[in-house]
Image (tube, coloured by chain):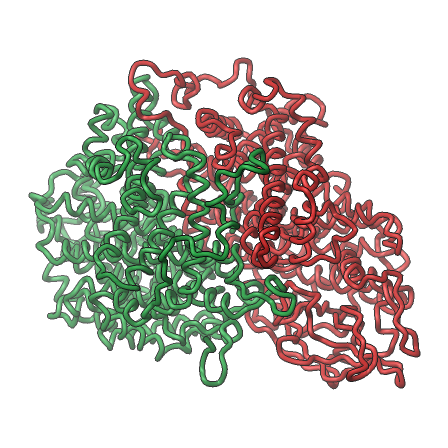
Chain colours: A red, B green
């Protein structure tokens, strides 16, 4: 628990002693040997049924990936033993072999050897996160970023030229967007593609070192092609006209040798993911034909006229970028699944490992019977389930949006796309932060053994670390989410930078901002379901999902209103909009997190509610309660500050969480086994007590 | 920020709109362009003077280490490039070379080539954490653990035989305490040393795999000697009598070859610290002479009689262990200094790097001018200062206790030693968790660049990860701290395991437990200094250090009382003491953290108060306020739950923190430069904008 916050503890005030103890009935010590609820019966978990629920409609796809992972399990050891350059080759070979099974091409049209099912491609990618993550990221670069850009930004010409080869892994490519000096601000990148009308070619140039392409996966060793993002310029010198960022297919190697005019530098050793060859690229007047422009959203005619169905350059830029949303959905899912590996190891270890003589002087107690250890691991298991179901929702939305007609000039599905982008961003943020936190907690919960490479945490921690940064820095993404909330994904959305957003919001009444949000109606509807009228926050049961949802919805609505008010007031007072934004930034980010937390809880509540009655439903409801209450507990200060939680009720929540942990404790191993992480991916022979015939449970 | 807690934001409730705004004057947006305090003048920081303050009495020692680090800076690159076995040799060579400068032997008696100054040895070790941490840990193993055990547990015979060689690095040794199956529960270890009266030898045996020595630094490749902890047994079979854990000097290699009867296995690759050769040891009837027993606290006569000046075996065990407290003090200091390296890089980067057009459309804003970025980094700088001064206190206490006469049968300094052990444990916990959290936050604050090895975060993160576990798992150490608090370091202290503690506390009145704690008087005394009488928590100024201290002291006292009450009630109700402890464990740990947080704040407040008036004092007071208020803010839910913080005041604290961040912002680079991390240890040429002539500031 690497935070300076003292964890909440449940106890009564000092001055309530000693004879009359009104809270005594609810005190966790008092209810020690009786079940908390009359009639409560401990559910049994059918691991297979739960796994079927988790795997969902893509069970077969996930099992194919599991089998492929098991077949190549040796790569987890190779990661420790091979030199960097040998390991890169090994990763490439595994990726190409996996491509041969159809695993990596599921999102591409069948005509080019793909599977024609976007949802399946997400499921396959997520599942790959159980194994070596260099393989995962290499797959993401080749098929998601490079292949996705050709597919989404290119047209028939490009598809015919490249898709079949890249789907089969015959042509490797890279995705050259990020620049050293511009990071998350892609719209400001510096690489230029100037159209030479005479030659009917684009000339790609890196004007300065701040504009070199940086951290580009596949660039240092393997890519023959690059999708290069550059400022499209037509005309020369003072005449030159710029049309914003566009993507071009640029050969960077021929027969394994770097092409003339291209300079490539290796990024060198990294914290993790050393099986991926990240590099830097400079272009010195590299010429490509006019058709190298990926022209789904814009075209340059041979004579140098610029044409686009989308007039507004900002809107065009964000429409293009929006087609690449799949990458964010994939990374979020990968983070969640990497966390599952860590939790599986730490939980199985915690029911084997004994420490100190706590219950009797003769026998040491297993770790998971300690209250503290339950508090460390069980809420993380609950949150992993919550995020899993939230990820299922966003992956489903992605599938639906991208299986329909593409974006058009009229933008008939524009609103749905903006909502999807926002949800993908938020889920990516929570999923990747969850991975960082969970892997760290699990490592510490396995003590010194967790530090040995054979126990997986070394690679999990090092490899996932950058997930919070790539495919969009988490803080930048939360600002994107907030912008969508505050502007209701308005048509103006794409044109606005932070200054624009501040001005836009300042121009509306605060009530207007709040009323336009999706959460506004939800708050009212859920309150109507709760007992107590205006006192719903005091009367409703803590385990009532409507109460839990009402709390998160209230927080979200309140925070959005607060941001709108502060932006408005600052600008009304004549402050610089940028300075106003900077001051309100923490509030903006908090509102975006609150929004995403609400979506995650809703996904879990709906999933559990839809189950038929039975033990599985009881077990998932326990987990859902545990997740909901730990989420409220983590921000209980805010709820108290805003009059939605009395101190008595706040303490009752902490007690209830402890009671829920004791109920979930006997289910813990089944809950992690249902994740279906292949045994070969766990390694950890000492931690799990492997014998010659397999792991001891 | 890898946590699911939504960060606190300062704003007013939604329903306070629109005309009357009572909080308007304090709102952060409203006070935008005027200084918050009339007459406030931004201080200037004299970096050299601040560094002198931080370095304290051991400036020269620290500068020697800085020079040695700079001389061997190449090792930071070697860590990435050499094979594991070559890197181990390289680390060994650097350690031995450093030993030649006197840097590593400062804690040993001058008669054996040491420096005779324990405080100096701590200062040297802490400073070493600016560099490669395999070197640091190898130094810790050789001179701290191995050398420290010979010095503290051995007598003249052992000193004469080993100290001169080990201080010079001619003899390498290891410290074989931890066993695979027993972890933090050293008293339960399984290795046996049976005295053979006929041969006047001890026979060392590993009875089972759970009792193999594990994670032993220096064991896999370099150690010739091991200090082995084993159950001392006299007599054979049914006659055998055990006297508890003792330490023995055991040769494990001769001329580089493993000695007969000893089996050594390499622990293999680790998450980090791969320059340290960790191994596992098994002993199969290995014979050592009777004099191999390190006999400072116990002796076996040639004819097999056991003698010890300390009758009680538990007390003897804890007295022996207590002499090794220096290791914990060292690790805590190392964690704090590793955090300084990360903060130096991230802060300097944050004033160079521009991102998005926040303030004006023409220029991107530097990261550290964003409110969120200030919130990420500046409280961590403040906390690093707080922990630095807290570490200075505990290192000073260690120096004083260990520079006096050693522990005696009468135990005349026993109480001081127990208090030191508790403080060392608590500071180690906070210092190492701070390192984990700070390095992670700084990595994320440097974006993708933070992921490249040349930018230091990869090694910092991987190498420090195990700090939270070794020299005592942080949660186990906090339980030790709590035991001391609850029993007032009573004579019974050493004899008690968790069951014993629960029973002991249950036998006292709760008031007795609370009144015996050191904090009890402090709470009263500080309240007398505050305005408002019983309403001190509402009337005192947020920036009054007495208010800040009163809050932390109140929390500590209240938590200790709560733990005592819950233990008492559970046992009074006839529950199993172990089960009671398990239930109360989170509360026990929270109380220990609260205690240590109070000590840390006191150290900072006292340091700042002792400074002469001037800009340096103003600057340190800003930092101290920032640290104190973020500490209260992090646990503001608890204070609200316990009636010590109104929701209005809680929000005012968050606003005040934002205001303090804006005041500290212009000082940030000076504050990290004063840490005095050698430029060669920062690397990060791109992040810091190095040119051929050095870093750009």
State whether residue B131 appears in this view.
Answer: yes
- The image position of residue B614, as x and y in percent, is 27, 63
- The image position of residue B268, as x and y in percent, is 45, 61
In this view, B62 is above or below A598: below
Q: Quick check: A390 left or right of B416?
A: right
- Please, which residue is most extreme toward the front here? B19
Residue depicted at 53% across the width and 74% down the height = B686
Q: Quadrant of residue A78?
A: bottom right
- The image position of residue B372, as x and y in percent, is 52, 54
In this view, B542 is above or below B348: above
Q: Quick check: B146 left or right of A290?
A: left
In this view, B302 is above or below A526: below
Judging depth in this view, the residue of B442 and B69 nearest the camera is: B442
Residue depicted at 36% across the width and 16% down the height = A21
Residue depicted at 69% across the width and 49% down the height = A507
Residue depicted at 76% across the width and 79% down the height = A204
Name the quadrant of the C terminus of chain B: bottom left
Give the tally of numbered discs: 0
State whether residue A80 appears in this view.
Answer: no
- The image position of residue B674, as x and y in percent, is 34, 68
In this view, B645 is above or below B677: above
Q: Quick check: B416 left or right of B185?
A: left
Judging depth in this view, the residue of B227 and B594 nearest the camera is: B594
Judging depth in this view, the residue of B72 and A486 nearest the camera is: A486
């Amino acid at each position: 628990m690497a935070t300076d916050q003292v964890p909440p503890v449940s106890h009564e005030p000092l001055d309530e002693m000693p004879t009359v103890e009104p809270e005594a009935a609810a005190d966790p010590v008092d209810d020690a040997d009786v079940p908390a609820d009359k009639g409560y019966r401990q559910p049994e978990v059918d691991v297979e049924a739960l796994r079927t629920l988790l795997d969902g409609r893509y069970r077969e796809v996930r099992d194919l990936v599991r089998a492929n992972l098991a077949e190549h399990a040796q790569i987890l050891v190779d990661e420790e033993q091979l030199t960097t350059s040998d390991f890169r080759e090994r990763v490439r070979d595994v990726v190409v072999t996996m491509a041969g099974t159809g695993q990596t091409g599921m999102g591409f049209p069948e005509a080019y050897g793909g599977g024609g099912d976007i949802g399946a491609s997400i499921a396959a990618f997520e599942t790959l996160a159980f194994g070596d993550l260099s393989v995962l990221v290499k797959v993401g670069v080749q098929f998601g970023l490079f292949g996705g850009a050709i597919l989404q930004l290119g047209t028939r010409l490009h598809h015919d030229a490249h898709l079949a080869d890249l789907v089969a892994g015959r042509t490797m490519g890279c995705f050259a967007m990020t620049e050293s000096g511009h990071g998350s601000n892609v719209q400001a990148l510096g690489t230029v593609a100037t159209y030479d009308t005479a030659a009917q070619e684009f000339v790609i140039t890196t004007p300065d070192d701040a504009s070199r392409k940086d951290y580009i996966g596949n660039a240092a060793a393997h890519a023959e092609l690059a999708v290069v993002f550059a400022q499209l310029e037509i005309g020369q010198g003072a005449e030159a006209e710029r049309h914003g960022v566009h993507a071009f297919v640029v050969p960077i190697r021929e027969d394994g040798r770097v092409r003339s005019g291209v300079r490539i530098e290796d990024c060198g050793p990294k914290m993790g993911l050393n099986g991926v060859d990240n590099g830097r690229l400079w272009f010195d007047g590299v010429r490509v034909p006019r058709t190298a422009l990926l022209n789904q959203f814009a075209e340059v005619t041979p004579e140098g006229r610029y044409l686009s169905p989308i007039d507004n350059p900002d809107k065009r830029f964000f429409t293009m970028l929006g087609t690449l949303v799949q990458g964010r959905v994939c990374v979020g899912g990968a983070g969640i699944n990497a966390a599952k590996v860590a939790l599986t190891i730490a939980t199985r270890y915690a029911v084997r490992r004994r420490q100190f003589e706590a219950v009797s002087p003769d026998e040491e107690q297993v770790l998971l019977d300690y209250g503290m250890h339950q508090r460390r691991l069980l809420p993380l298991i609950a949150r992993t389930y919550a995020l899993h179901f939230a990820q299922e929702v966003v992956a489903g939305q992605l599938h639906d949006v991208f299986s329909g007609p593409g974006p058009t000039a009229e933008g008939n599905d524009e609103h749905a796309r903006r909502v999807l982008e926002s949800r993908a961003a938020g889920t990516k943020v929570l999923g990747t932060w969850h991975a960082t936190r969970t892997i760290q907690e699990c490592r510490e919960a396995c003590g010194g053994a967790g530090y040995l490479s054979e126990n997986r945490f070394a690679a999990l921690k090092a490899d996932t670390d950058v997930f919070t940064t790539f495919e969009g820095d988490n803080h930048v993404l939360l600002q994107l989410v907030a912008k969508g909330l505050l502007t209701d994904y308005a048509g103006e959305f794409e044109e606005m930078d932070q200054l624009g957003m501040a001005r836009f919001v300042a121009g509306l009444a605060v009530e207007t901002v709040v009323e336009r949000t999706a959460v506004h109606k939800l708050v009212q509807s859920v309150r109507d379901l709760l007992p107590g009228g205006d006192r719903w926050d005091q009367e409703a049961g803590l385990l009532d999902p409507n109460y839990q949802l009402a709390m998160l919805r209230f927080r979200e609505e309140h925070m959005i209103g607060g941001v709108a008010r502060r932006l408005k007031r600052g600008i009304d007072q004549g402050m610089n909009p940028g300075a106003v934004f900077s001051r309100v930034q923490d509030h903006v980010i908090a509102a975006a997190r609150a929004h995403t937390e609400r979506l995650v809880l809703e996904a879990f509540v709906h999933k559990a509610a839809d189950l038929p009655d039975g033990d599985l439903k009881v077990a998932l409801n326990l987990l859902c309660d545990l997740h909901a209450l730990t989420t409220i507990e983590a921000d209980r200060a805010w709820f108290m500050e805003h009059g939605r939680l009395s101190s008595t009720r706040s303490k009752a929540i902490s007690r209830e969480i402890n009671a829920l942990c004791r109920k979930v404790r006997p289910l813990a191993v089944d809950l992690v086994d249902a994740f279906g992480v292949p045994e070969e991916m766990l390694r950890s022979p000492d931690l799990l007590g492997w014998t010659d015939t397999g792991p001891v449970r």
